[in-house]
Image: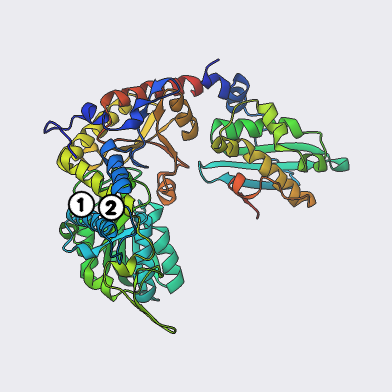
Amino acid sequence: MVVTTTPALDARRLRADFPIFEQTFHGKPLAFLDSAASSQKPRQMLEAMNTFYETSYANVHRGVYELAERATEALELAREKVRALLNAPEAREIIFVRNATEGINLVAYAWGLMNLGPGDLVVVSELEHHSNFVPWQYVAQRTGAGFRMISLDDQGELRLDELDAIAREGQVKVVATGVVSNSLGTVNPVDRLAAWAGEHGAIMVADAAQAAPHRKVDVQALGCDFVAISAHKMCGPSGVGALWGRAELLEAMEPFLTGGHMIQAVGADQSTWGELPHKFEAGTAPMAEAVGFGAAIDYLNEVGFDAIEQYEHELAAYALERLAELPWVTSYGPPASRRAGIVSFNVEGVHPHDVAQVLDFEGVAIRAGHHCCQPLMRRLGVVATNRASFYLYTVPEEIDRLVAGLHKVKKAFG
Amino acid sequence: MGEFDQLYREVILDHYKSPRNHGLLADADATAEGQNPLCGDEVTVSVRLGAGDVIEEVGFEGRGCAISQAATSMLTDLVKGRTVQDVATMPKDELLDELGIPLTPVRLKCAILGLGVLKLALHKAKGTPLPEEWGTSTGELVLE
């Protein structure tokens, strides 16, 4: 796979890699400003999956014939690519899952049910995506552990000054936060939270689904114990994600899903579990999806994460600047320098559904709703927001089309 | 006619900007509320019944998208003076015909939220069957 770019990111050139942009919607080119929900797919990734199906497909592991070995190699190569992406110490610490949500559920069930009880605390943030909120709320209820939220300041950033008071309420056992907020784009101080978790003997679980597409996620630098990502948000296919966990923690855990492949031996009364990562990969793996995930990582590495991150900051700054021209638009979240390429906003007196509908007629796709962040929506005092999110194929003209569309919204409903 | 004008007909925008029967009734026989959790539409409907179980007055409050609020406003006009039984079995198509706009599955939920809530209020007042819109099609109706 070859991706050619100039050192700074050339979004116009990258767009040509994405077949989705070859069609029109409502007679207009697609301005896809919903990459935070899921990204579009480059041809290189699609071709890698197709090639795998056409040349290397068979069920992995245990097959003795050449084709099965080839498929196994492809799956394990993908695992190695995920390991390198996250700078994880060992490939066996990378568990393929369906998505980040499943990865977090794996930790919540397999670690949480065994290790949590009355008097313990699970600490999440008010900014959290439901993916890293609901599993912990549920497992805390199941085990009798307490459940606390770190609240937000008015800029949508975590109030770390609350941590000491939280720690006095019980034994902190889990700290779970996102690395980047899917709703406001806030970049959380995960390294500091991880250090705090470590001081209390708690595990740090980071939801990096929104961070991994846009910036380098280094699990060792973050100091986390578990990190979950989804391929579909980072140019990869839907249906696969990865959980990284520290080997010693994963080894001590009971399995999450049981069945084929994850066993060592199955007896009439009892079974024993396989080695990492197999213990956590019951059933047939998402093989082609993992191969696509690997190809997506190659694609992003070719473009360069530093270039992607910088470009998205520029887009976010430009969008915030353009939205600030509209006195009837309220934007939420931190300044552009401390956020990823995500902008949430509301139009005075107009429900986000109507905003998104009118923009759709202009070929501009944004998301309207609670963005799987109902606690955050309550904190902002709104039922929903509009969210425009950017990626490496976004061009500034699409932000101009967003702003022009908002003028139409205001004219129609204002 | 453009896509915007098809969906946001003048009459829809008029009901949205100047809702009919707005405000809850102080002397209601029943009140019910419902939400469309997907997009955060909220509607509360109160009804007062007269002789022969006729809907004498109906009032609503809510916040949400233009379709949800306009549809509820139009609904209140449609049902006044009709019997509880009649409205409790009113097919959603009667309201949709009145709206007269093309609706995607997502927006359909917005459009019939108020109808579900009204039927819930009638259920509370007179024990009429719960609405067919109950459950996933409109999100959640809150039975107090």
What colouring method underlies this structural image?
rainbow
In-image side of B132 versus A406 (left or right): right
In-image side of A306 versus A12 (left or right): left
Which chain letter goes with mark 1? A
Contact between labelled residues 1 and 2, with CB atoms less than 8 Å apart:
yes
Which chain letter goes with mark 2? A
* Residue in front for this viewpoint, B89 or A385: B89
Residue under numbered circle 2: A208
Q: Amino acid at mark 2?
A: Ala
State the residue at coordinates (70%, 42%): B118
Residue at the bottom extreme?
Answer: A269
Task: Note whether residue A210 is visible.
Answer: no
State the residue at coordinates (61%, 30%): B70
Task: Note whether residue A264 is visible.
Answer: yes
* Residue in front for this viewpoint, A146 or B130: B130
Graded by Cα atoms within 10 Å as few (under 14), some (14 to 19) or many (20 or more), the crowding at tag 2 reads many
Graded by Cα atoms within 10 Å as few (under 14), some (14 to 19) or many (20 or more), the crowding at tag 1 reads many
- Residue A238 picture location, percent across and down: 37, 47
Residue under numbered circle 1: A217
Q: Secondary structure at mark 2?
A: loop
* Residue in front for this viewpoint, A267 or A136: A267
On the same chain, marks 2 and 1? The answer is yes
State the residue at coordinates (27%, 44%): A48
Q: Secondary structure at mark 1?
A: loop
Give residue A155's quadrant in the image.
Answer: top left
Q: Amino acid at mark 1?
A: Val
